[in-house]
């Protein structure tokens, strides 16, 4: 099983248990993200928790100390973090945090759209594009914009595995293909 698949399963289980136990699923997500960033931001800590040569008991002790210092962390999340330490799966934390965030967004009917344009979008154009994507998907859209001058003009929007390509580069490529097909006849 790949680490991404395992992280997604842990995230789903955490989400389901947190919701079942009436925990604040948003707060669990924030706590998980903060814990994951804490570990990732400290190179020594990250190496310690992901090093297979370090005994599991020692990793659990480190996680217990971190949880004690953190204070108000959801019991559901605390149990998961200790279980990950016991199973030597703490290296999954970054992917688990990302998967949990995706699960939260899915639950809230929000999709993430990555939009690439040739130039920076003015705020009013970004808002109009976001509204168009809301109409196209029927969900709330969290817009992430990127600039890539190589698309010449237009925009490329990626929502999950669906790509809406309205770039000038793609349109020129299609014209080239039609011209080449017409010349071949």
Image (cartoon, rainbow, N blue to C red):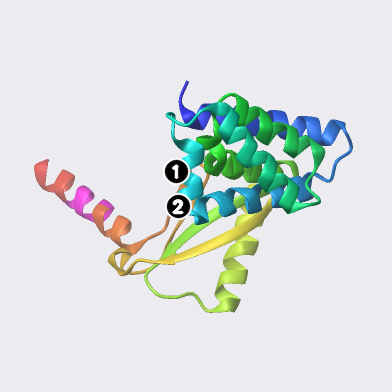
- Of helix, strand and loop, which one carries label 2? helix
Label number found at residue 55 = none
- Give residue 60's position: percent from left, percent from top: 62, 33
In front of the other: 48 or 130: 48
- Image position of 119 with respect to 83: above or below: below
- Report how far apart the C-alphas of labels 2 and 1 lie in the structure: 6 Å
Whether residues under marks 2 and 1 lie with C-beta atoms below 8 angstroms apart, the answer is yes
Which residue does the numbered mark 2 point to in the structure image? Answer: 43
Question: Can residue 181 be seen in this snapshot?
Answer: yes
Other-residue count near label 2 (Cα within 10 Å), few / some / many at <14 / 14–19 / ≥20: few
- Prevailing secondary structure class for the magenta stretch in the rendered image: helix
Left or right of 54? Residue 151 is: left
Label number found at residue 47 = 1
In front of the other: 17 or 114: 17
Tell me if residue 178 is in the magenta stretch: yes
Question: Can residue 105 be seen in this snapshot?
Answer: no
- Per the rendered image, the range of residues in magenta is 174-179
- Give residue 53's position: percent from left, percent from top: 42, 29
- Image position of 185 with respect to 88: above or below: below
Residue for point 28% across, 65% down: 150
Tell me if residue 97 is in the magenta stretch: no
- Give residue 181's position: percent from left, percent from top: 17, 44
Residue for point 74% across, 32% down: 79
Quadrant showing the C terminus: top left
């Amino acid at each position: 099983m790949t680490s991404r698949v395992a992280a997604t399963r842990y995230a789903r289980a955490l989400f389901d248990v947190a919701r079942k136990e009436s925990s604040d699923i948003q707060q669990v997500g924030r706590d998980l993200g903060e814990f994951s960033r804490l570990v990732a931001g400290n190179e020594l800590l990250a190496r310690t928790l992901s090093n297979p040569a370090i005994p599991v008991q020692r990793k659990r002790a480190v996680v217990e100390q971190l949880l004690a210092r953190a204070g108000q962390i959801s019991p559901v999340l605390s149990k998961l973090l200790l279980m990950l330490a016991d199973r030597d799966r703490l290296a999954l934390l970054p992917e688990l945090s990302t998967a949990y965030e995706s699960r939260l967004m899915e639950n809230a009917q929000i999709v993430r759209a990555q939009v690439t344009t040739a130039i920076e979008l003015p705020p009013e154009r970004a808002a109009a594009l976001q509204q168009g994507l809301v109409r196209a998907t029927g969900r709330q859209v969290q817009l992430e914009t990127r600039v890539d001058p190589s698309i010449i003009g237009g925009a490329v929007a990626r929502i999950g595995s669906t790509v809406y390509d309205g770039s000038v580069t793609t349109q020129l490529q299609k014209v080239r293909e039609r011209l080449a097909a017409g010349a071949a006849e």
